[in-house]
Image: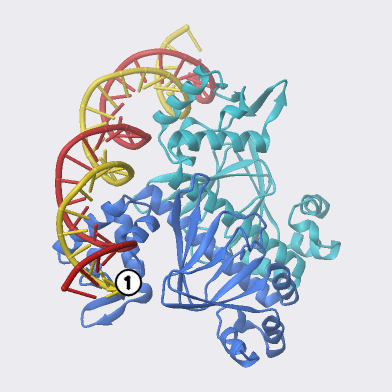
Chain colours: A cyan, B blue, C red, D yellow
DNA sequence: AACAGGATGTCGGCTGGCTGACTAAGAATA
DNA sequence: TATTCTTAGTCAGCCAGCCGACATCCTGTT
């Protein structure tokens, strides 16, 4: 892969498009690529505690494991998102990243290299800080959701967010390409597979949505209060 | 209040001690002071969506309110901590800050001024980013706690953290000056007053701790696994 | 000392949603 | 086309911990 290919990808990145050509090149030089097929593990916090990843193409899920080996899906991330040690803090939870779309391409920087680049580019620094701040806000929201809402409400708001983020409108319906199992969704909204299945069927009966293994069609978005 | 007094405070701050005298002075000029007694509200996200606060002295709690008016204590913060719009992101949750120690002194910056300072000080920028990253990690931890652990375990780990952070060892015991009600604690660990009271009494019976209205004495820290 | 308002203590009833267990239906491998 | 694996569907049983209700205890105030 030549430099131009990398260049293009970062050039259009929400964070890195602040940089001029020379600066972009500097980043490119420290970039490291990786690809994965669906289901493959891209990253293990345990092994690679010193890298920041950015997603060039595809969708991944971040899974966290606690001491007793329980797992939760912590996040679903897509093109442009960062993961790994992006907080620049050296304490690492036990987590890993799995490709959930067919093909995923990521590139990564060493933490120290990345910090150098940030330190030399105040505009990037500020943007980056805001970006981390945004992730914090998102996490705070999820926390508040978990505290204030019951499972039904959490599923509804999850579906709503998903629809807004990447739904393709067809007629009055919103179609979502579904790469998540009920198990995944359950884990994201912090519930169980059975409960999610049950609620999905309830929504189907109420004619609010339809779903198959690989597509979810939302017929009545506003009913998902 | 003269400049020297402000200067000293920031000079010893975990974040701002990176700056040289001239830079510190710049920050001081944009600083704005505020004091509050126990129970007084220091900050309302609704009114002051454009300021970052730092705690000069004392302890505060951050309370979040959802659409239905439910409240949770989101955080307890102390000297040196930041609150308000510290994520630099303009979306604001409904939250407010209340003094819980007898006297609290805070100072604040306008968001835009603060951003200017950051942009001109790459070292500060990087530190600040890490600091926000650290807050994110902390939030992620709380989330994981809520998902993986039951109320008892959450209370135990809350007490343990508290003890480690600000316990005064006396003999084999750790004494905590308690400025929180059972209600506050319940809200922090995401439970109810009654349950917290019950668990506290359980711990007392097991001789793991003792408590009164304004002091908690932990007799057996290792039992709070 | 009396009072008020908040913080604790205690208890029984109730329920959201988890658990386990088993079946059915798609997808993938061969 | 048979076999195997993963995902989805369904249901009865169960329980942590929430909820309401009320009693009691502190602490600061008058």
User: Which of these two is toward me, D4 or A42?
Assistant: A42
Q: Position of residue B113 (x, y in %)?
A: 73, 73
- Neighbor class of circle 1 (other Cα within 10 Å; few <14, some 14-19, many 20+) is some
Residue A40, relative to residue D6: is it above or below? below
Marker count (numbered): 1
Q: In this view, does A21 lie to the left or right of D11?
A: right
Instruction: Find the residue positioned furthest to the right.
Output: A21
Residue at 53% x, 61% y is B96
Q: Is residue A15 left or right of residue A93?
A: right
Q: Where is residue B27 in the image (x, y as percent from the top left)?
A: 68, 81
User: Which of these two is toward me, A70 or B15?
Assistant: B15
Residue at 57% x, 33% y is A159
Q: Where is residue C30 in the image (x, y as percent from the top left)?
A: 49, 22
Dividing the picture into quadrants, the one containing residue A148 is top left
Residue at mark 1 = B178
Q: In this view, does B151 lie to the left or right of A178?
A: left
Dividing the picture into quadrants, the one containing residue B89 is bottom right
Residue A41, relative to residue B162: is it above or below? above
Residue at 49% x, 41% y is A188
Which image quadrant: the C terminus of chain B? bottom left
Q: Position of residue B100 (x, y in %)?
A: 42, 70
Residue B77, relative to residue B141: is it above or below? below
Which image quadrant: the N terminus of chain B? bottom right
Q: Is residue A222 left or right of residue C19?
A: right
User: Which of these two is toward me, B188 or A1?
Assistant: B188
* Chain for disc number 1: B
Q: Is mark 1 on a helix, strand or loop?
A: loop
Inspect this view and state whether residue B210 appears. Answer: no
């Amino acid at each position: 892969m030549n430099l131009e290919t990398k260049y293009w990808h970062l050039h259009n990145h929400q964070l890195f498009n602040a940089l001029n050509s020379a600066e972009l090149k500097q980043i490119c030089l420290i970039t490291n690529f990786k690809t994965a097929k669906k289901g493959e593990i891209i990253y293990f916090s345990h092994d690679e505690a010193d890298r920041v990843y950015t997603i060039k193409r595809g969708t991944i899920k971040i899974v966290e494991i606690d001491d007793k080996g329980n797992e939760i899906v912590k996040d679903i991330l897509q093109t442009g998102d960062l993961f790994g040690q992006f907080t620049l803090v050296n304490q690492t939870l036990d987590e890993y990243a799995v490709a959930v779309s067919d093909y995923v391409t990521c590139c990564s920087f060493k933490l120290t290299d990345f910090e150098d680049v940030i330190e030399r580019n105040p505009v990037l620094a500020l943007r980056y800080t805001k970006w981390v701040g945004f992730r914090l806000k998102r996490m705070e929201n999820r926390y508040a959701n978990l505290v204030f809402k019951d499972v039904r409400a959490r599923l509804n708001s999850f579906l709503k967010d998903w629809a807004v983020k990447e739904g393709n409108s067809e007629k009055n319906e919103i179609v979502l390409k579904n790469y998540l199992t009920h198990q995944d969704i359950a884990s994201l909204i912090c519930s169980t597979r059975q409960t999610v299945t049950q609620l999905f069927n309830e929504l189907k009966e109420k004619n609010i949505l339809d779903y198959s293994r690989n597509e979810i069609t939302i017929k009545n978005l506003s009913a998902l209060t």
